[in-house]
Amino acid sequence: MKTYIVGGAVRDELLNLPVQDRDYVVVGSTPEEMLAGGFRPVGKDFPVFLHPKSNAEYALARTERKTAPGYSGFAFHAAPDVTLEEDLARRDLTINAMARGEDGTLIDPHDGQKDLQARLFRHVGPAFVEDPVRILRVARFAARFTDFSVAPETQALMRAMVDNGEVDALVPERVWQELAKGLLETQPSRMFAVLRDCGALKCLLPELDRLFGVPQRAEYHPEIDTGIHVMMVVDTAARRAHALPVRFAALLHDLGKGTTPPDEWPRHIAHETRSVKLVETVCTRLKVPAECRDLALLAARYHGDIHRAAELRADTILRLIEKSDALRRPQRFEQLLEACAADFNGRLGWEEKPYVAADRLRQALTVVQAVPAGEIAKACDDPAQIPQRIHAARVAALAAIAAAVKETG
C-alpha cells in the first residue's frame, strides 16, 4: 500500500500558495484494509475515508467510465490493481493531476508543472467532455488564478460540451454550489467570462447573458455596456471582501435591463420591477439559499431608491427602511448598502468615489431606531392610533435631521 498527496495541495505548493486541505490517494489497498486501520468511510459512490486522527480524506485509487449523460452518469472502479497514473488520468486539468509521494517525489504524467509555469488551464484527456461540472470548475479556477488562461483545445472541448447539451444535464444544486464558490474568489468576473466564451452562460444564466451588449444610461459611460458594468460591480464587491449574499446581489441587481426593448435604449424605464421578477426566476431555478435570494431581491427592488437617498422625502426614506425590514434586520440592511455601494462604484473612474447615500441611510436608520416607540405607545390612549403615532414621530425625526443637514450644507 502506498499513499500520495494529490490535486490542489500539490498545485498550490508548486505555486507557493498556502495549502488549505490535503487530499490523499491510496494505491494497492482495499476498503477492508482501510477500515481495519481505523479509517472512517464517508464515500457513497466510491471508497473515501477519513483519517482516524487528522480527518484528512484518503481515497482509494480508482478509474471511472461514462454510463449516462450528465455529471452523475459514471461507473467507478476501485481496486488494489488501479495504479496512481490511472487515477490521475481521470482528473480534469493537468495542474490538478499531479501527486507527491511519501518520499517527496513529484509524479507529473501530464505536464501539469509545465502548464503551471505557462499559466494555462489544459484538460488531461478526451474524457474531460464526459463531466459538465468541469466547465464550471475551469471557470471557477479562472476567478481564483487571475493570470491563467484556458488552453485553446480545452476551450474547444468546452464549447463542444455546450453544443452537445451536456450542460443541460447539470442539476441546480451543483450549478449553485460552483457559482457560489466562484463568486467568493478573487475576481469573479473571470468565471463569467469563461462561461460566456464557451456558450455555457447562455444555458445556465440566460438572464445575465442578455445584459452584454445592452447600453448603460448616457450619464453612466455608455461605452461600457450593462454586462460589463455588472462584472465591474461584482469585482468591486469581491475586492472589498464582501460576503456571498452581497456578491450575489451585485450580480443580479440589473437583470431587468436585459429585457428593455432596443428602441428604448439607453433608457431603462421601471427596470427594477422586471429585475425583481427575473431574480425570483433565477433563485427558484437554481434553488438559491434564502439569505442570498432575499438580499438579491432587495437590491434589485431598491437600489435605485437608495442611490437617490439625498432626494427622498422623510416619509419615503422611512418606507424604504420599513420595506427592507431594516429595524429588525440591521445587518442585512448594511449588506444591502454594501451591494448598492458596489453598484455605484462599479463604473469607470468611480472606483473610490464616496458613496454618500449609504452614510445618509445609515444615519436615517440610527435616527429611526432612537425614536422611543415604547414611550409613545404608553402615552397613547387609543391603541389603534399607536402605529400612526410612532410612524409620525419617526417621519418627524427624519425630517428634522434632513433640515439640519440642509442648513449646514
Image (tube, grey):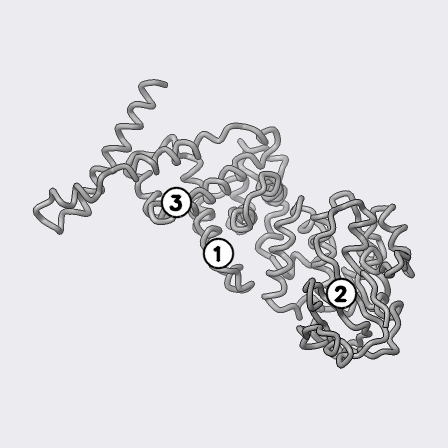
User: What residue would you read off at disc 2?
Assistant: 161
**Is 312 above or below relative to 165?**
above
Secondary structure at numbered mark 2 = helix
**Can you tell which mark lies on residue 330?**
3
Q: Quadrant of the C terminus?
A: top left
Secondary structure at numbered mark 3 = helix
Q: Nearer the viewer, residue 223 or 322?
A: 322
Farthest-out residue, left = 381
Q: Quadrant of the N terminus?
A: bottom right
Does residue 168 appear to the left or right of 219 in the view shown? right
Does residue 74 appear to the left or right of 217 in the view shown? right
> Mark 3: few, some, or many residues within 10 Å (few <14, many ≥20)?
some
Q: Position of residue 395 (x, y in %)?
A: 25, 36
**Is 292 above or below relative to 361?**
below
Q: Nearer the viewer, mark 2 or mark 3?
A: 3
Separation of marks 3 and 1 at Cα, in angstroms: 17 Å
